[in-house]
Amino acid sequence: MEKTYKILLVEDDESLGYLLSEYLKMKQLQVEWAQDGSKVMELMEQRLFDLIVLDVMMPHLDGFTLARQIKDKHPNMPFIFLTAKSLKIDVLKGFSLGALDYLKKPIDEEELVARIMAHLSRLEKTVAAPIEKEVISIGSYSFDNRNHVLLHEGESMRLTARETELLKFLVQHKNNLCSHKDILLSIWGNNDYFNRKSLNVFVTHLRKYLEKDPSIKIENVHGRGFILKVNQ
């Protein structure tokens, strides 16, 4: 039996929210529509969701602030932004907060569903994929990829789902060049300009997490990709 995914749609515009929620339901997705961002955290305590579609420009609580709250309390919850804010700085800010995608209004309903299903499919494959080791050694760090945790001398750092995917990919190819294209197609599913910018943001996150061990370095090979170098 095919799984029915549960989507939380956070959109304050009544007309657009109704249109999108009804369209998603037509595509056999279970949809909970929240018009007020300030109610979302309470709602997430009551119900389980597979993915959140999050508007940025909302009264009371904007989408970027809400995304931070979601990430703090539910670090593995995937979410995508749906917004009219299309400046590069807004797009990069969205990705830096851990968003899987950033869709600009006006949005085509079919494209929204296609992107939702593509992300859910990739996330499910990541969870279902066989894991050779639950805990992997990276220099003086221990990487618990199943639980999205990086450990160093008793200190625990919680990673987002996307940070975990990226670090796992680099570890699997450590000391070898990982091209931008291979990383993006494997993890983001799309090798475009904004996803490349998003990749750079996540590499910056990982560098900060790994900076306590000087034997570890994520090297940028200009115009080609990245190498996770671990000196044994």
Image: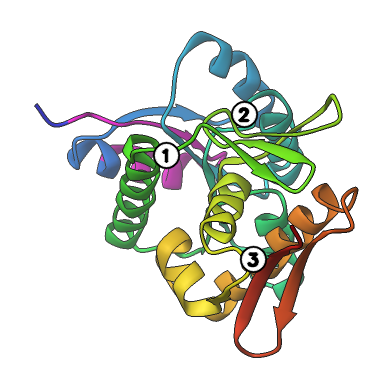
Inspect the image, locate mark 1, and give the three-letter code of the amino acid beneath it: Glu
- The reply to whether the magenta stretch includes residue 147 is no
Residue receiving disc 2:
36
Inspect the image, locate mark 2, and give the three-letter code of the amino acid beneath it: Asp
CA–CA distance in space, label 3 to label 2: 28 Å
The quarter of the displayed image where residue 95 is located: bottom right
Q: Are marks 3 and 2 in contact (CB under 8 Å)?
A: no
In the image, what residue occupies the spot 61% across and 79% down? 225
| Residue 209 image offset from top left, x and y in percent | 81, 47
* Of marks 2 and 1, the one in the foreground: 1
> In this orientation, which residue lies closer to the viewer: 98 or 102?
98
Q: Is residue 228 rendered to the left or right of residue 116?
A: right
In the image, what residue occupies the spot 64% across and 90% down? 223
| Residue 120 image offset from top left, x and y in percent | 36, 44
Q: How is the image coloured?
A: rainbow
Residue receiving disc 1:
132
Callout 1: 10 Å neighbours few (<14), some, many (20+)?
A: few
Q: Is residue 34 rendered to the left or right of residue 124?
A: right
| Residue 195 image offset from top left, x and y in percent | 56, 70
Mark closer to the chain start, 2 or 1 = 2
- Label 3, secondary structure: give it: helix
Inspect the image, locate mark 3, and give the three-letter code of the amino acid beneath it: Ser
Task: For residue 81, say whether it is visible.
Answer: no
Establish if 204 lies above or below 55: below
Q: Which disc, if any, is residue 198?
A: 3
CA–CA distance in space, label 2 to label 1: 43 Å
Establish if 22 lies above or below 42: below
> In the rendered view of the protein, which quadrant contains the C terminus?
bottom right
> In this orientation, which residue lies closer to the viewer: 139 or 13?
139
Per the rendered image, the range of residues in magenta is 3-22
